Amino acid sequence: AQTVTQSQPEMSVQEAETVTLSCTYDTSESNYYLFWYKQPPSRQMILVIRQEAYKQQNATENRFSVNFQKAAKSFSLKISDSQLGDTAMYFCAFMMGNNNDMRFGAGTRLTVKP
Amino acid sequence: DTGVSQDPRHKITKRGQNVTFRCDPISEHNRLYWYRQTLGQGPEFLTYFQNEAQLEKSRLLSDRFSAERPKGSFSTLEIQRTEQGDSAMYLCASSSWDRANYGYTFGSGTRLTVV
C-alpha cells in the first residue's frame, strides 16, 4: 500500500521569508503523481502544485516550487516570500497512475508570522 | 459553475441516529470522491464513483455507511446508527476521469458531531 509521511506537524515562518515543508512517500510503482494541497482554516482544500513522477523537472507555480527526488521518494514544498495568507494546513498527496484515488499525509500546519 | 457544494455544512446528531449528507460535484465531472478527515489528520479515502457506478470502497466504509450517486450527478453519504467515532469532517471532491491526475476539486465539507 502507498503511504505518505509528513514529519513536521507544525512549522512557522516570518513573513517574506522562505520555508520548506517535507514529504516522503512509499510506493513500488513507477508511474504516479504527487500533489500539495493547502487547507486554510475553515475553508476548502485548494491544489497548490502538482508533479508527474516521470518528469525530472521540478514543478513551479509562482512562489511555490517542489524538490522532487524520485530515488529518495521525497517531495518537498518550498514557499518563497511567505505571505500571511499562506497560513494553512498543507497536505502532501499521492496518486497512482491508474487515477483511482488520492492518498494524503497527515499534514503540516504552517503559520506565517508578521 | 460554483464548484463542489456540500450540504449541510455542519450537523450535530445524537448517537444512534441516522444522518445523510449531500454532495453536488462540478457539473462536467463524472468522478466523485468521498473522504473523511478527523481533527489534525489528512483526508482518508472512503469511496469513489464514476458516473453512477461505485468503483471502489475503503475498508473504512463499514456496513453502517452507504453512498449513492443514482443519476451520476449528486451523491449522498448516509451513516446509520451513528457512533461518537464517526465525528469528523466529510469531504467530497470531483474530477473528470481523464483529468483526475491533475488533481481533485474539493468541497468545503460537512462537519459531523455525534453527541
Image (spheres, coloured by chain):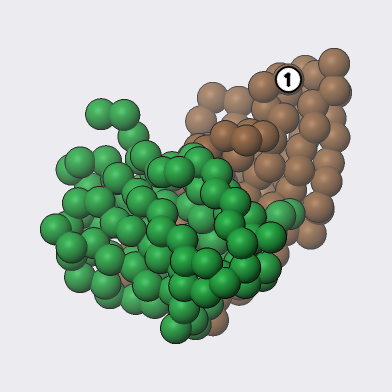
| Camera-side residue of B98 and B82 | B82
Any part of residue B31 in sight: yes
Quadrant for the N terminus of chain A in the image: bottom right
- Residue A69 image point, x, y percent: 62, 58
Q: As shown in the figure, which amino acid type bears the numbered disc 1?
A: Leu
- Residue A87 image point, x, y percent: 72, 30
Q: Is residue B99 left or right of residue B112?
A: left
Kindly indicate the quadrant of the structure image that contains residue B69: bottom left
The residue lying at 79 percent from left, 59 percent from top is A7
Kindly indicate the quadrant of the structure image that contains residue A63: top right
Q: Which chain is assigned brown?
A: A
SS category of the residue bearing label 1:
helix
Q: Quick check: A78 above or below B29?
A: above
Q: Residues within 10 Å of mark 1 (few under 14, many from 20)?
A: some
The residue lying at 52 percent from left, 74 percent from top is B81
Q: Is residue B92 left or right of residue A104?
A: left
Quadrant for the C terminus of chain A in the image: top right
For mark 1, what is the residue? A84
| Camera-side residue of B88 and B99 | B88
The residue lying at 67 percent from left, 49 percent from top is A76
Any part of residue A80 in sight: no
